[in-house]
Image: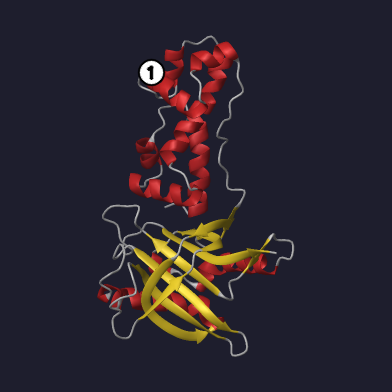
Amino acid sequence: MYKPYNLLDNLLVHIEKNLSYGLNLNTLSERFSLSERHLRRIFSFAFKRSIAGYVRSRKLASSLEDLLKTDLHILDIALGYGFEHEQSYIRAFKGEFGITPGDLRKKGEVVKVVPPLNLFDAKQSVDGVFFGPEIVMVPEFSVVGKNHHIKSIDVITQTPKMAIDFWENEQRSIKNALSPGLVYIGLGRNFNSGEGFMDYLASVPVKNLKNIPQGLKGDTFDASLCARYRYIGQHHHFELSRERMQPMYTEIYKFFYNEQEKYALLKDEVYFEKIDARQEKNFNLYEATYCQMEWFAPVKEK
């Protein structure tokens, strides 16, 4: 099995080398020994776009060379890039560039293409790869879970154990959970720098904060502009560890202390980590070829 960085890098290179060789999700799945659903999920998580849409865009961009530099018939160009019919190529072309292939040949307009993706902004860890920071807007959401008052220095080592304990023992008792068995939220807040402690809520998102089971606690994360980091690891979700996550957290601390950044990271006020498997049918956190996790903290402009 490929490590995540190698998988994504080899996948992008393979796509670029095979744009005119019947490239599709099925052939990519066979080439990289992954199910189509896992390939779709990993690509979407890493690059925030569908693999099918990306391959189509790159095929269309590559076809511009044949369209504008040769006298090939449009049908031959369409078949050469894996389109079954001339009309399907023309429809996709117009959807991508806002003009038909024939009109582009006649008018010579400038069109914008989707460039090849690369991993220049990705960073490797022991068994994975991570991306970030990205600035995103996170809507308000509520969670219910088990709260832990822990030393701040123990966050990286202890919270994975707390997450597993909650997932295996308490999460099923929360009856109004959104997407039961598919989403985990670890919410950290109430940092006390003087005492060196914080609260960590191992939780699931809920419809509302009514009927909270005894021994558990509810909380609400306000709508906030946040910095987001994304991690993909070659291991199970329950095998997240300090060693595996340390490179990403090192980058988070660099962002926090970088005086040249446009945004100030408010991680000492609140942050949350999220594992979300809702994109796949019949998938849960116990089934994983690759672990995918997101980390968020509010930011404000300096």
Image location (x, y in percent) of residue 145 = 36, 77
Total tally of numbered discs in the picture? 1
Image location (x, y in percent) of residue 5 = 52, 52
- The image quarter in which residue 88 lies: top left
- Give the residue type that dot 1 points to: Gln
| Residue 110 position (above or below residue 117) | above
Outermost bottom residue:
195
Whether residue 130 is visible, yes or no, is no
| Residue 52 position (above or below residue 193) | above
Q: Residue at x 57, y 64 (%)?
A: 248
Whether residue 258 is visible, yes or no, is yes
Q: Residue at x 40, y 39 (%)?
A: 28
Left or right, 13 with respect to 146, comes to right
Q: Secondary structure at mark 1?
A: helix
**Mark 1 neighbour class, 10 Å CA radius: few under 14, some 14 to 19, many 20 or more:** few
Pick the quarter of the image with the C terminus.
bottom right
Q: How is the image coloured?
A: secondary structure
Q: Residue at x 57, y 58 (%)?
A: 124
Image location (x, y in percent) of residue 184 = 38, 67
Residue 252 versus residue 243: which sits nearer the camera?
252
Image location (x, y in percent) of residue 189 = 51, 78
Left or right, 28 with respect to 113, comes to left
Q: Which residue is mark 1?
A: 87
